[in-house]
Image (cartoon, rainbow, N blue to C red):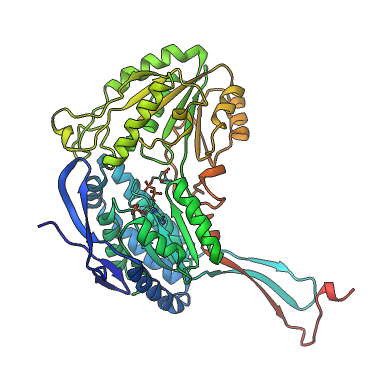
Amino acid sequence: MPDKFQNFINGKWVDAKSGRTFENRNPAHWDEVIGVFPKSAKEDVDEAVKAARSAYEKWRLVPAPARGDIMRKIGDLLVKNKEELAHEMTREMGKVLEETRGDVQEGIDTAYYAATEGRRLFGHTVPSELPNKFAMAIRVPVGVAAIITPWNFPMAIPTWGIFPAVLSGNTVVFKPASDTPKTATTLIRIMMEAGIPEGVVNLVHGGGGEVGNAIVVHPDVDLILFTGSTDVGKQISRQASATLKRVSLELGGKNAQIVMDDADLDLALDGVLWGAFGTTGQRCTATSRLILHDKIYDAFMAMLVDRTKKLRLGDGLLPTTDVGPCINEAQRNVVQSYIEIGKKEWARLVYGGNIAVQGDLAKGWFHEPTIFDNVKPNMRIAQEEIFGPVLSVIRMASLEEAINIINGTIYGLSSSIYTRDVNKAFVAIRDIKAGITYINVPTIGAEAHLPFGGVKQTGNGHREGGWAVYDFFTEWKAVYVDYSGKLQRAQIDNY
Ligand code: NAP
């Protein structure tokens, strides 16, 4: 019998009220059931929001440094359990152990950052325009925050939302992706062990259309931090506007790496292999387009194909594996459909292109790392997010052309340029329209203490990570203290 898991509402582990469940399976061995989880619905969401609302009135009064102390304990517990967690996560969503260790590390860094923020949460003091009057602006919590997350970083992304939300004095209803409910459950257990009080963080498992939607339209949810696809993000934005909820959206990308003719080609090669095929291309910041200078095009393509051939597909738990499976059958079908689209568009398939079924690979959702070249910037494989191990290579003859290509999609998350010319690097920093620009670094590798997010249809202007996310999870309150002992009218009323 597979293990059975529950929701976590008001400090108690509970089934969905309907008693319905769903199975979660290992994408590298789809016959292996990881566990059975509650298939929740609106009634379960109502309970979770009620618990979060009630806990909010006490939690908002806990001093931020004390909330920060709990964050430190969470960080310590994540450190202690890192290896076990990484194994569990690889089994649940497939990426290789080295990467799930990194995913946990991002959670650790986010916890320790939140712990220190408990002693900052800086406001402003400013001079008043009147004598004997004091003016300041302080941060106050907002209320009940919904955190809705994808499966590709099952630890890091929930921690990016939950930790700053809670540190700021909000309470949380957390809906993880249906593909990674076990990691979410373990994260909640760790938070409880560290001392998060009952009702402050609530976990509701279930489908996006049912549970996610019920959270989004719930009148007593004040904030939504959503990380996922652009289509769902747009829908959430529309729905949340009915009650003017504050919404932070971190959505899709079509990230590119530029390689100039003066670049260190070996370095650029390591970068693109990691950026394009790490996490099987299933990162929002994955390198999906490679923009190569004409003068090094042929030499670089030969190097790229040679190294890609050496990548080993397999179960992410095996030390021999470089690239794990796609998350599920539907996602692998999406990848395969883009291979057909690329061929029909007359891009040249130079490597891969197939579902992988040799030996044990037949038991999972594996797809070969794939490279198209002769790709034109306006082709669908160069415009649409594929979210799989597919790289589209585009030729260019100048930095200006490369920047036009990089900017020519609806997205603007991550970008990278390899060059030894500092002038070109700074022009790229100035002109690339993206939330993140890396110089001589692949498109992936964000650090927890910097703002993370994108421009255009990658988001709605908010940022996860670093100090910036605390602007989302707090309200500004302006405070005036008059110690003159008489009515002093503000300057606008004096003239
Ligand atoms: P998704 O389908 O949009 O799902 C994301 C989350 O939203 C899941 O928990 C999902 O639940 C839930 N959901 C689905 N429909 C919903 C609805 N109508 N209302 C409320 N919630 C709903 O995305 P995904 O396939 O999990 O993740 C891949 C996408 O995420 C890619 O586009 C990737 O670029 C993006 N992403 C962006 C960032 C970033 O920071 N910019 C980071 C990582 C990933 P179920 O799992 O139950 O469907």
On the image, the x and y values in percent for residue 442 come to 44, 32
| Nearest the eye: 372 or 449 | 372
Outermost residue to the front: 344
| Nearest the eye: 228 or 109 | 228
| Nearest the eye: 34 or 346 | 346
Q: Quadrant of the C terminus?
A: bottom right
- Horizontal side, residue 329 vs residue 161: left or right: left
Residue 273 appears anywhere in the view: no
Q: Quadrant of residue 102?
A: top left
Compared with 360, 451 (above or below) is below
Looking at the image, which residue is at 32% across and 40% down?
331
| Nearest the eye: 439 or 329 | 329
Outermost residue to the right: 495
Outermost residue to the bottom: 485
Q: Quadrant of residue 215?
A: bottom left
Compared with 277, 75 (above or below) is below
Residue 234 appears anywhere in the view: yes
Q: Quadrant of the N terminus?
A: bottom left
On the image, the x and y values in percent for residue 344 come to 40, 22
- Horizontal side, residue 350 vs residue 469: left or right: left
Q: Quadrant of residue 387?
A: top left
On the image, the x and y values in percent for residue 122 come to 57, 64
Looking at the image, which residue is at 32% across and 57% down?
207
Q: How many marks?
A: 0
Looking at the image, which residue is at 47% across and 39% down?
253
On the image, the x and y values in percent for residue 24 come to 22, 52
Compared with 242, 357 (above or below) is above
Outermost residue to the left: 1
